């Protein structure tokens, strides 16, 4: 069942009229079908794609407020007219991802390395909780310590804690130009070594990834006249290693491939995993032992892994790998044979999570966490 | 069994304080207007101590307050009468630093500046820098989501806390978050940060470290009015520069700073401090643009420095402003309101008008880059009605911030001081949800009772 909701009142009516245990799920752009198109029985989707539009934007404030169903691309386009951008680089922007979906997923694209991810840029939220009440947290100013930080709570909440109505973000001036250095490596160990050397360099990177084919990509952004010197410093930091520089449309394509998940092979599931640099070798080995056909892109300087899981391997096998490595994962895309497991591996929170969920959704109208 | 009986069974020895003289030191915090005598103080050495003390309080239905250095400016660590203080100062170790991952794991009593000192050998630092950073603790920073002058670029405490182990109000230990900057799943860590101790006590904290910048350049620009300084800030933002800090001080605040730490600021009505940091090439390029902007901004005097000693003195003057006001006035209230950055000029003019109308002196020091004001309202508590007048003015300023679409606190928290103003910012439904979350986690409302939220009937 999909019910469109074009207003706060619509959402409130749907929530209030739903019986306890209703299994409501807010959806909009449907760019991450593993989250929006659950095969599980009895899921009733609330379609928020009609709840769209920018509510407030004053470039001098460096903040923007928009309805939850607003496409990220629309927001980025308006910001770009004023030389600003949303630095958390929401994935699947070209595919039609919305602000609400981005926050509910909590995923950040590769260029979030420079200034931070979704949690570092959401400053306010209005949402309908499990009792049908419209509530607000945070605000429209960039610094705010009043009340509980509800905007942060909804990040990564995958529709289980409330239906977002509108969101306020802090934005930053956009780098005038970018360039990317590509380094060839022999294997994962040499790629990780290059990653460490690049992280240690004084050069502040916009993005730093190891692609599924083992290339290391380091992106810098800023005033065009600074880029040559900085690219040279990056080459020096890595040492004697074959490299090439990418600029212009070719460079943008390289990173669009990452943020649009274009490296995904047909019907692979795509699972985002949070990790730290030191855990990469063990995870990589465990993944390829469990599924030799799997592909992995390490992103955000080695603090995130995007796993492409083969179409014929169940997600339960990846779940077991992540449990063993003690790493949390979230499925964003999947094929027909993967099963509909959204959260994989261990997740923090324990009874704290259970108690917060019970406060926001006392009658269990949204899906269980 | 009484809570004292339960606590004395924990084998704390001399780490359980019950003598009035010992307890007196814990009766107030950085906001001295509020004080209460606790029933007992536990000097915790470990997470186990904290959990045991919390369980004792829970079993006896006695409220407890966690306390680090006691520097809260909102009364956040003021004890509850008849309650227990759990002091975390002894849990002050930096447990580990992973330089490649840029992560530090620390105990909650660790002094803010100590984290940066421990990380410096690896070329790293801890970014949030409250003015009290040489004495305030990470646990308190986390509970109140502290800020600092350099938050303009780096963000608040919650942007730098990746994970933690916490003792919940019933004594249960849980882990929130982990050690990566982008959590997978709901951001429990983000909710816990800034919850003012209402969800329990963090006993181990994983922090994000950032690189010590290769180059830093600090500019001073003197203006004939606060409005002119504010306009310069707006121009810098419009030009797409992203300074790490943009601060303004007015003449009275500078007078206080000169009286104490003598930073040698130029004489003027309003001083703008702008700092850019990063790679050498980037700072060089940004500073060229900034020099041009400041030269054309109507400043009567501009100077820029890269000398570490000179920079340190500039910041010492700025960061000492709160305490230095003590040189000008026996009593003062520090405010922490936030307004949208484009409304700064308007709100400063209005504060000036209120000050002249009431005859109450107000010194202004503020984080201009992010619209966070710190009006210092000066009064002499010995004069009849002076304290009431100052508090009334403080309330008017908070109302003004809210009416302009801002917040009553940017970085000090609600505590006990601003609790009555929270309903001006949030609706009944908003507050009801906050209460529901609080009671779901702490049904007895024991943990830091009476801070941020009113106690239930």
Image (tube, rainbow, N blue to C red):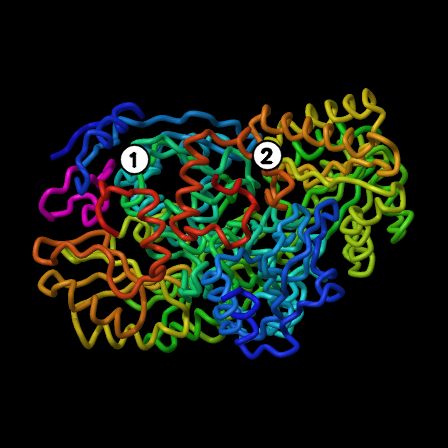
Residue occupying the point 11% across, 48% down:
A40
Say which chain tag 2 marks: B
Q: Label 2, label 1: how many angstroms apart (C-alpha)?
A: 26 Å
Circle 2 sits in a helix, a strand or a loop, which is it?
A: helix
Determine whether A61 is above or below B356 in the image.
below
Does A184 appear in magenta?
no
Say which chain tag 1 marks: A
Image position, residue B81 (x, y; %): 63, 52
Q: Residue furthest front?
A: B1
How dense is the environment of label 1, judged by Cα within 10 Å: few (below 14), some, or many (20 and up)? many
Residue occupying the point 21% across, 46% down:
A367
Q: Is residue B3 left or right of residue A316?
A: right
Question: On the image, which quarter does residue A195 sit in?
Answer: bottom left
Circle 1 sits in a helix, a strand or a loop, which is it?
A: loop
Q: Judge by depth and name the residue closer to the eye, A331 or A262.
A: A331
Question: On the image, which quarter does residue B180 sit in?
Answer: bottom left
The residue to which callout 2 is attached is B420
Determine whether A160 is above or below B204 in the image.
above
Q: Magenta residues?
A: A24-44
Residue occupying the point 14% across, 33% down:
A2
How dense is the environment of label 2, judged by Cα within 10 Å: few (below 14), some, or many (20 and up)? few
Q: Which mark is residue A131?
A: 1
């Amino acid at each position: 069942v999909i019910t469109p909701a074009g207003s706060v009142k619509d959402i409130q009516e749907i929530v209030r009229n739903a019986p306890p245990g209703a299994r409501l799920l807010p959806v909009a752009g449907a760019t991450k079908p593993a989250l929006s198109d659950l095969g599980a029985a009895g899921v009733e989707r609330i379609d928020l794609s009609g709840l769209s539009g920018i509510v407030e934007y004053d470039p001098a404030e460096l903040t923007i407020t928009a309805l939850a169903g607003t496409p990220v691309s629309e927001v980025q386009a308006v910001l770009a007219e004023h030389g600003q951008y949303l630095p958390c680089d929401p994935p699947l922007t070209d595919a039609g991802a919305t602000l609400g979906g981005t926050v509910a997923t909590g995923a950040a694209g590769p260029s979030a390395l420079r200034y931070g991810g979704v949690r570092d840029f959401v400053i306010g939220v209005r949402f309908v909780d499990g009792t049908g009440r419209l509530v607000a947290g945070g605000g429209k100013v960039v610094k705010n310590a009043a009340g509980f930080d509800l905007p942060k709570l909804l990040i990564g909440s995958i529709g289980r804690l409330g239906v977002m109505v509108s969101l306020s973000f802090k934005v930053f001036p956009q780098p005038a130009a970018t360039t990317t250095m590509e380094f060839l490596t022999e294997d994962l160990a040499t790629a990780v070594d290059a990653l460490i050397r690049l992280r240690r360099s004084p050069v502040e990177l916009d993005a730093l990834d190891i692609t599924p084919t083992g290339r290391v990509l380091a992106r810098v952004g800023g005033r065009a006249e600074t880029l040559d010197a900085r690219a040279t410093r990056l080459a020096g930091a890595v040492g004697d290693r074959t490299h090439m520089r990418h600029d212009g449309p070719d460079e943008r394509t390289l990173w669009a491939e990452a943020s649009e998940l274009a490296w995904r092979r047909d019907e692979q599931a795509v699972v985002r995993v949070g990790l730290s640099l030191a855990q990469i070798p063990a995870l990589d080995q465990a993944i390829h032992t469990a599924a030799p056909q799997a592909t992995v892109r390490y992103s955000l300087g080695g603090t995130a892994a995007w796993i492409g899981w083969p179409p014929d391997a169940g997600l339960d096998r990846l779940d077991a790998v992540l449990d063993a490595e003690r790493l949390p994962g979230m499925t964003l895309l999947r094929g027909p044979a993967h099963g509909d497991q959204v959260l994989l591996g261990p997740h923090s929170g324990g009874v704290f999570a259970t108690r917060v969920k019970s406060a926001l959704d006392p009658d269990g109208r949204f899906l269980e966490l | 069994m009484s809570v004292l009986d339960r606590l004395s069974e924990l084998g704390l020895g001399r780490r359980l304080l019950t003598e009035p003289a010992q307890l007196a030191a814990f009766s107030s915090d950085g906001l001295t207007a509020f004080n209460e005598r606790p029933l007992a103080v536990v000097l915790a050495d470990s997470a186990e101590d904290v959990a045991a003390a919390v369980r004792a309080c829970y079993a006896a239905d006695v409220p407890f307050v966690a306390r680090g250095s006691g520097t809260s400016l909102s009364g956040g660590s003021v004890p509850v009468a008849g309650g227990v203080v759990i002091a975390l100062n002894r849990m002050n170790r930096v447990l580990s630093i992973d330089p490649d991952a840029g992560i530090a794991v620390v105990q909650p009593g660790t002094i803010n500046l100590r984290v940066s000192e421990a990380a410096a050998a690896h070329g790293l630092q801890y970014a949030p820098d409250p003015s009290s950073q040489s004495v305030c603790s990470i646990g308190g920073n986390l509970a109140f989501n502290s800020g600092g002058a350099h938050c303009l670029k780096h963000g608040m405490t919650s942007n730098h806390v990746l994970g933690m182990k916490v003792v919940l109000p019933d004594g249960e230990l849980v882990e929130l978050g982990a050690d990566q900057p982008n959590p997978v799943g709901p951001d429990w860590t983000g909710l816990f940060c800034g919850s003012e101790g209402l969800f329990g006590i963090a006993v181990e904290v994983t922090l994000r470290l950032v690189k010590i910048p290769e180059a830093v350049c600090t500019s001073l620009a003197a203006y004939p009015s606060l409005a002119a300084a504010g306009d310069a800030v707006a121009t810098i933002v419009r030009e797409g520069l992203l300074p790490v800090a943009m601060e303004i001080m007015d003449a009275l605040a500078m007078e206080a700073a000169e009286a104490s730490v003598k930073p040698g600021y130029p004489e003027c009505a309003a001083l703008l401090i702008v700092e850019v940091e990063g790679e050498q090439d980037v700072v060089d390029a940004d500073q060229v643009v900034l020099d041009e902007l400041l030269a054309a901004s109507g400043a009567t005097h501009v100077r820029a420095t890269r000398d570490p000693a000179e920079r340190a003195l500039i910041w010492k003057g700025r960061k000492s402003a709160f305490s230095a006001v003590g040189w000008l006035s026996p009593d003062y209230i520090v405010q922490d309101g936030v307004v949208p950055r484009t409304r700064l000029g308007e709100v400063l003019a209005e504060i000036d008008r209120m000050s002249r109308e009431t005859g109450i002196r107000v010194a202004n020091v503020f984080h201009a880059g992010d619209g966070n004001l710190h009006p210092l309202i000066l009064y002499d508590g010995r004069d009849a009605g002076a304290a009431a007048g100052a508090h009334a003015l403080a309330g008017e300023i908070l109302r003004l911030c809210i009416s302009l679409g801002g917040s009553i606190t940017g970085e000090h928290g609600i505590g006990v001081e601003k609790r009555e103003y929270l309903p001006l910012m949030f609706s009944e439904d908003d507050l009801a949800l906050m209460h529901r979350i609080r009671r779901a986690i702490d049904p007895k409302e024991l943990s830091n009772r009476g801070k941020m939220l009113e106690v239930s009937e």
